[in-house]
Amino acid sequence: MGKVPAASHTLAILRTLASRGACSASTLAADLQLPRSTVYHLLATLRETGFVVHRESERRWSLGPSAVDVGLAALRQDPRDIVVRPHLIRLAEQVNETVHLGVLQGAEVLYLMKESRPGISAAPTLITAVGVRLPATTTASGRAILARLPFEQVRALTATPTAFVSRTERGPRSLSQLRSVLDRERRQGYSVEIGEIMLDHASIAAPILDVRQQPTAAVSVTVRCSEADFADRVDDLSAAVIATAERINAAR
Amino acid sequence: MGKVPAASHTLAILRTLASRGACSASTLAADLQLPRSTVYHLLATLRETGFVVHRESERRWSLGPSAVDVGLAALRQDPRDIVVRPHLIRLAEQVNETVHLGVLQGAEVLYLMKESRPGISAAPTLITAVGVRLPATTTASGRAILARLPFEQVRALTATPTAFVSRTERGPRSLSQLRSVLDRERRQGYSVEIGEIMLDHASIAAPILDVRQQPTAAVSVTVRCSEADFADRVDDLSAAVIATAERINAAR
DNA sequence: CTATTGTGTCTGGGATACCAGACTGAAGGA
DNA sequence: TCCTTCAGTCTGGTATCCCAGACACAATAG
């Protein structure tokens, strides 16, 4: 524990609001096990600085514009943004589709980057906007990372009620099914998701590894097409995604 | 001033790192007028919680992954994201180009949202990625917002050495030139930027106003084409952008 | 190689921030 | 309408955090 509890608590409030969304001061006090008056003092400071906004009509507190500013600055200043993004842009141009960079967070994948040069696609693109998180077990990006983790770690990460929930009722439904899928995808070097996140959409992803060969992120391409049409494109798309991930690994 | 200086100082460190990028602890202490030991204590807490990362080889401190997480969560949880983004998606589909939402920050515009369905475009899209900030005076988005502000406020915002710096040597070079441009753009209801941010690219933007008719953001469309070709598209694009801004205003 | 500057850590005392709990007012339920 | 619950504010005493400054080590400049 650092020597500045007020600092720790302030940051804990930010993280709690990030993970659970807008909530009351009493909920924050309960979650963080702090006196309500302490939480109100910290919220007052957070509000003054714009990190938190008080929604008076709802009697709830939420993250504010300063949090957005700092977070986007952090994203822009991340050395990966400088190294990785040009590769994503090049891949998007090459395959003429939407490309993402995702990172694992617990049992979810968080999309940090997104570059598009899609062909004709009528589907809303909201679902993989920067900042969105989706279950790792049902996304190509998530599985590309999970496939390179020790299985004990995968088991621990997915030991939650929501790990196998899927909005399209597709994808692995149990740990043993997941293990089979991850084994196959690790051997082939890329992960594929067809219709698990969005019907009529498919994704291919390859992991990005650090110097110790640990997966840190995944590059993915998403296309809108039927399963039959997608079969024709798998070889080209997977080759392009793997090549891009390898170039990123080499650029370290 | 809040009653929790440690909280204020912690947040001030985050903002300073956001605005000036990675720097030494002594620089932070000087900027914030805090004792170095206090700054080190706060940095220790920020590092423990992942909000800050110590780049030991550079002996500098920078924003860390927790700052990215909280910022992206703040962006996603922003009620505007829920209200505004579907309109941007629809506009992108309609005009088949890249669409942004930008907000004013000082003399710069910050891109909060970006949706793409571009036609063929070989230019890198990095320059208007989410989180990027550009001078307000040379971007359509920035000028769309400035055009709706009292000119005294515009004068105050641009009273900096960098307000009229442009990487393409185009755009207004003085306050009086800016005033003329803003007057014209306010009358026509949209702002246009041709080749000021990127050569061979043009943007059209319309402001989004709050209930007091104050500009809070701007919607813009960016296309890649020559100045001659762009002239043919101005009417259609500006009508679409203005209509989208009006729909967003009506959705409040 | 030496001197200077800057980074990072440590200490103890005094100023102050945190906590428990009371109070007021608003919202919700019966 | 009344009662209960919750939000938000306030107070004062004690535990503790912040600051000045010293020290060791690393990096830079001459």
Image: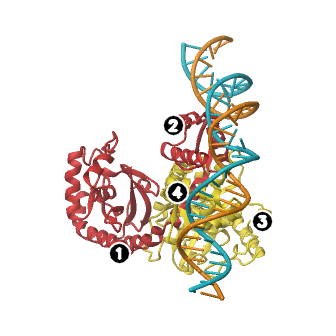
Chain colours: A red, B yellow, C cyan, D orange
Image mark for residue A31: 2
Given the image, on which type of amino acid does mark 3 rest?
Answer: Ala
Given the image, on which type of amino acid does mark 4 rest?
Answer: Arg
What residue sits 38% from the left and 70% below the top?
A92
Distance (Cα) linking label 3 and label 2: 44 Å
Label 1 marks which chain's residue? A
Residue B95 higher or lower than A36, as above or below: below
Distance (Cα) linking label 4 and label 1: 28 Å
Residue A106 higher or lower than A58, as above or below: below
Q: Which residue is more in the foreground, A32 or B20?
A: A32
Label 2 marks which chain's residue? A
Label 1 residue SS: helix
Image mark for residue B47: 4
**Are dots 4 and 3 in contact, CB under 8 Å?**
no
Q: Is residue D29 left or right of residue A14?
A: right
What residue sits 66% from the left and 68% below the top?
B136
How packed mark 2 is, by other alpha carbons closer than 10 Å (few <14, some 14-19, many 20 or more), is: few
Label 4 marks which chain's residue? B
Label 4 residue SS: helix
Q: Position of residue B39 (x, y in %)?
A: 63, 58
Image mark for residue A250: 1
Residue hosting label 3 = B156
Q: Is residue B16 left or right of residue A193?
A: right
- Could one spot residue A204 in this view of the protein? yes
Q: Residue furthest right?
A: B152
Given the image, on which type of amino acid does mark 2 rest?
Answer: Asp
